[in-house]
Structures are given as C-alpha cells and as structure tokens.
Amino acid sequence: MTSRNALIYVGLLIGAVITLVPFGLGLLTSFTSATQFNTDSPLSLPKPPTLENYLGLADAGFGRAIVVTALMTAVILLGQLVFSVLAAYAFARLQFPGRDVLFWVYVATLMVPATVTVVPLYLMMAEAGLRNTFWALVLPFLFGSPYAIFLLREHFRSIPGDLINAARLDGANTLDVITHVVVPASRSILVTLALITVVSQWNSFLWPLVITSGSKWQVLTVATAGLQSQYNAQWTLVMAATTVAIVPLLVLFVALSRNIVRSIVVTGIK
C-alpha cells in the first residue's frame, strides 16, 4: 500500500468515526437509565442495559406518532411515484406546445427555499378547512416534486425509442407503454427515488409542526421534540425515540442498497 492510499484510508476512517460515533452514543444512551445518565459519564456503558426508556415511549403515546408517520410517508410515496412518473414521461416523450419552457420553469422552483412556501400553504389548508388533518400533512407533497420529475425525465429520455415504438406497433397506448416498458426499465431509479422520498418525509418536521396541533396527527419528529419539554429533557427517553425513528430507515437502506448502487452505476455511465 502506498503512502497516498494509506492517507486516503486514514481520512476515510476518521470520517467514518466522526459520523458513526454519535449514533453509537445515542444507542447506548437509549439503553441507559436516567439515574445513571445523570450521575455517570455519558461515555460509560449501561449498567445494566434497560428497556425502561422504550417502555416510557409507549406510555407517552409514541406509538400513535409512529403509525401517523408511516401512513403519511406511504401515501406521499405512492403519490410521488405515480404522479412523478406520469409527469416525467410527458416532459420526456410527449410533444405539446411550451413543453420545455414549462418544464424548466417548474424545475426552477427547486431554487426556492421550502420555508418560503410554508405560510402560503398554511393559508391554503386553513381556507380549505384542512388544518390539523391528515390530508393537510400529505397534499402539498402528493403530486410529485421538481427533483423527482427532473430525475425521472432525464432517465426516460435515455430509454431507447425503439422499445417504445415497438410497443406502439403492438397496439399499446401511452399508459401501457409507461406500465410495461418505461417503469420496468427504470426500476433502479424508481427505488432510489422511493428511498429519497421516504427519508425526507419520515424526517419531515417544519410542515407537520406548523399544520398540526395536539397529539392526534403528531409525527415522529414533532413527538420527539415534544419529549424534551414534556419530560424535562430526559435525554435517555429522547435517544430512545431517536433510535426508534432511525431503525426503519436503516433497515430500508440495507434492503435497497443493491438497487441504489445499480442506479448510481447506470446514471454514471450515462
């Protein structure tokens, strides 16, 4: 091994430690009793490990927040995939007046910070009588996003036109082409987009905080933040809540990692 490679590996190792150690400490803290955490060093191991923090989450009604977050994420994911695929195909393959101008104007909204739209969206939901409802959580994100449509459009444009023309010759309509040709040829990109959507919505905080109140439609991030004030900053309880929120994302990433790597390879080649 050359000295250059050794330096690269040392740098990567340092980066990995800096990234992973906080997660490890959070996990250890979640199994530490509040008494030990307040008296011993935060770096000390749980003596003995305890599940009282996770049981405390159940007593605090944290289970409802998990269900609401999972349902919200699933509905938004379905809407994002369906409407983004349809819009991206239209921008990539269909011909209509002003197509490119409309597409780039829509993509330009990526430059607008999300916080700018919070107040207008809130007023729209309030006027529609949807404030503090499930639909207020999902409607602003249900019909695709500029990033998703841009990503899929670029991929759809790279699909050989002969495949689509062959399907047309076999009598397939536009919906058949999307369902039986475009979507199967874009599986890796769609899996990557699905993971990005799940992570962003699972960790969504500002919009659920603004549009909901009380515990009925409270999501994981808002419920976790509420634990800090509700239980006088019991960090062992907060770390347990954080661990519960992270574990599903880690499992999802491990399950889909092969498709993610494949999509990176495909986009890199293109």
Image (cartoon, rainbow, N blue to C red):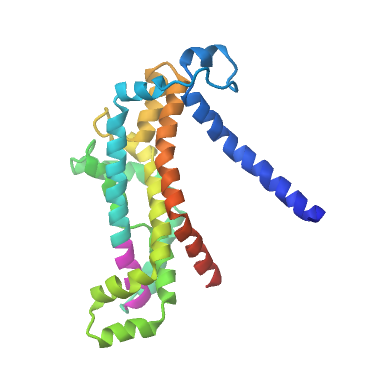
Depth check: give the residue in front, 8 or 147: 8
In this picture, which residue range is highlighted in magenta? 83-94
Left or right of 74? Residue 154 is: right
Left or right of 265? Residue 208 is: left
Residue 212 spot, x, y in % from top left: 28, 34
Tell which residue pokes out farthest to the front in this image. Answer: 48
Depth check: give the residue in front, 102 or 140: 140
Q: Residue at x 53, y 66 (%)?
A: 265
Look at the image and tell me in which quarter the N terminus lies: bottom right
Q: Is residue 224 magenta?
A: no
State the image quarter where residue 67 is shown. Answer: top left
Tell which residue pokes out farthest to the left in this image. Answer: 129
Q: Could you tell me how many numbered marks the image carries?
A: 0
Residue 257 spot, x, y in % from top left: 47, 55
Magenta segment, prevailing SS (helix, strand or loop): helix
Q: Residue at x 30, y 33 (%)?
A: 65
Residue 18 spot, x, y in % from top left: 63, 38
Residue 71 spot, x, y in % from top left: 27, 43
